[in-house]
Amino acid sequence: MSSSPPRFFRDSSPAGAPGLKRSQFTYRQLSQLASYNASSSPLRVIAHIDLDCFYAQAEMIRLGTPEDQPLAVQQWQGLIAVNYPAREFGIGRHCNVTEAKKLCPKLIHQHVATWREGDVKWAYHDDAAANMATHKVSLDSYRLESRKIMAVIKAELPPQLQRVEKAGIDEVFLDLSAHVHTILLERFPELAKPPPYDDPTEKLPRPSIYALDWQADALVDLDDEHTEIDDPDWDDVAILIGSEIVRDIRRAIRDKLGYTCAAGIANNKMLSKLGSAHKKPNQQTVIRPRAIQHFLSDFKFTKIRNLGGKLGEQISQTFSTEAVKDLLPVSVEQLKLKLGGDTGIWVYNTIRGIDPSEVNARTQIKSMLSAKSFRPSINTFEQATKWLRIFAADIFSRLVEEGVLENKRRPRTINLHHRHGAQTRSRQGPIPQGRQIDEETLFDLAKNLLGQIVLESRVWPCANLSLSVGGFEEGVTGNMGIGAFLLKGDEARALKAGPHTSMADDGNELHPVEKRRRMDNGGIQRFFSKRELSQGANRELGFNDAAIKCNSNGSGGTLGSPVNEMVSGEVEKKESVLSVSEEQANRHEHPFTAFMCSRCNAKFESAEEHQSHQDWHFAKDLHDQERVNSAFVTRNHQANDASSSSRPGSQKTGAAADSKRRGRPKKTERGQSKLTFG
Ligand code: TTP
Ligand code: CA
Ligand code: CA
């Protein structure tokens, strides 16, 4: 600014007493806090809140279970959520029900709710575990609880100053910057004064003694042996105000709904998420900017979001280490040289705790899918129709959540995929506009699509059916604009092209999206395994991508790879959104570290997908068992040779060894700041 005084005058500028040290932050940086200016506000405050053992807590609350009662949520024979009292017995997701009961005979194992073939509403069925073929898991009750929790969180924040991103069924990111800014100005009126010389690049006065006192109060429960508290600046104050807000939110969730949760508060998403996972249950961890390096250097970089996969692997091979602290001395030039320009810079920043990604207030759902793989296969139109009714009800209830009844958003296309042997057929059609979508409409459309497929050729037995809706548009009212008649890009082409049955190199069918992805494999995407790339395409297609992910863990599977033929169990894919769009990959924001299968390390972006993957393992185990049995019998018949190693017994050994390998690694890194609550 031309009118501002020369630099050397600034030390005695009027806002602070002469000789008093200035803040390292400027008036401009403070005001950026109010505008959620992600990349340029070093003062910003981001929180991540994650519910403790979410499904287990939901069941405890529904059933009125005492807090110290060990409880796990069961899906078929496996466990998908385990409460903290049960974890004390060594029970985890790696256990099956029998193993868990041995560890703790008084364990309550509640099966998830299911849709039963032919029913029109999901319910809790006592016999669900024994009837995988005729039941389909419903996560509606957890989604409902999740919505209530979201509502409480939002009610705790001023309506104009909230930015909340739902990052999973039981977790959110909050950008508290603007809210914190308001509180800062209220508590510290000196900050509300105009900058000296009206120059926003002037440094702020240092936080007052009052700020110090306040901070000491807020840090009563701090374990601060690794942090500095004697010389706070505004970033410390901001983050501590953030932690007060989060504590209030957590208390409200506890008081109003009965749930406990963990939280992390930091100046970006990546750190806040590491923070919430740091101390569980029912605790919050504050990562102050000046403690970031200390906090991160103890980590393996493979534990950081997006560094768990191929990229992490490549880095650890290239630099012969997995430790963040060993990578810190590596120059950005060297990282760029070894990993490529963008990636090198991204890694350089990430291990320094720099993450400019924004909290997205609304993560748009692009499509919704409801599916089931059948084992045994189904053989009649009537049977298929019963499942279509369930899919329609399932999708409709999620559409209601998306505001379809209020015409906030509505899908324009409906797709049905049908698998018979190695062949998948699909039909897509428009959803008639201009009148309310209801369950019956979806069902009729789906039945119609099935009718078209059935007419085509031999379609029974059917191994998989999946129904999806897509092409969402915003704010449609009764009077549609011309947009309602126009479909864009792939959607329009898909509709025009009608059914597709193109073949991949490997003789399997290939969807146009998959084709595009196979060609489109440069840049940062090369670090994301084929498995991850094919996941997105499969999700759009409605294939059981759980099978593909797992198969490809070692071998880089693609659509229709042999193991795909063995798929059984259930596919529960909700809210399916393209997984690795180029844009996401380029921004390093693809969400593949959320859920990891402890059996095969496949990664998933949502609990639902992870769950369907567990189904797949279960079904595949059954299948393998049967396959080995029958191979054994066949060989016995044919060659009268029982000495083969492929015996049921050896299979069991494999499974047992496998189950030993399972189990999520628990972090033992030391924390820095911890605020206890409740
Ligand atoms: P998480 O937040 O990963 O785990 P959690 O809430 O059960 O336990 P924690 O206290 O450690 O956070 O997952 C949220 C829910 O998602 C979980 O309660 C059940 C479901 N889920 C699965 O169904 N399968 C899985 O493998 C995982 C990881 C989660
Ligand atoms: Ca959780
Ligand atoms: Ca979670």
Image (cartoon, helix red, strand yellow):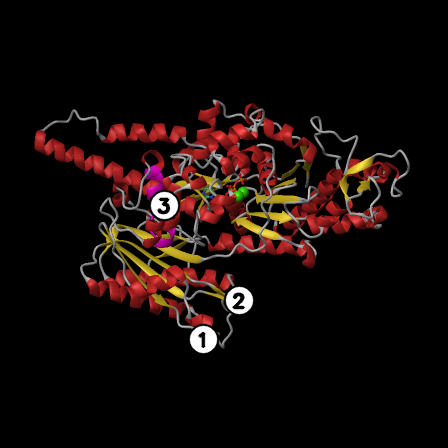
Q: Earlier in the sequence, mark 2 or mark 3?
A: 2
In this rendering, is residue 519 above or below 297? below
Where does label 3 land, which residue?
Answer: 534
Q: Earlier in the sequence, mark 2 or mark 1?
A: 2
Report which quarter residue 532 is drawn in: top left
**Cα distance in 3D space between marks 3 and 1:** 36 Å
Q: Nearer the viewer, residue 10 or 268?
A: 10
Amino acid type indicated by mark 3: Ser
Whether residue 321 is visible, yes or no, is yes
Farthest right residue in view: 18
Query: What percent of the width, then of the height, locates residue 166?
Result: 55, 51
Amino acid type indicated by mark 1: Gly
Looking at the magenta stretch, what is its main secondary structure?
Answer: helix
Query: What percent of the width, then of the height, locates residue 561?
Result: 27, 42
Q: Are marks 2 and 3 in contact (CB under 8 Å)?
A: no
The residue located at (21%, 55%) in the rendering is 461
Report which quarter residue 246 is drawn in: top right
**Cα distance in 3D space between marks 2 and 1:** 14 Å
Tell me if residue 539 is in the magenta stretch. yes
Q: Earlier in the sequence, mark 3 or mark 1?
A: 1
Q: Nearer the viewer, residue 48 or 647?
A: 48
Where does label 1 land, which residue?
Answer: 434
Quadrant including the C terminus: top right
Where does label 2 land, which residue?
Answer: 408
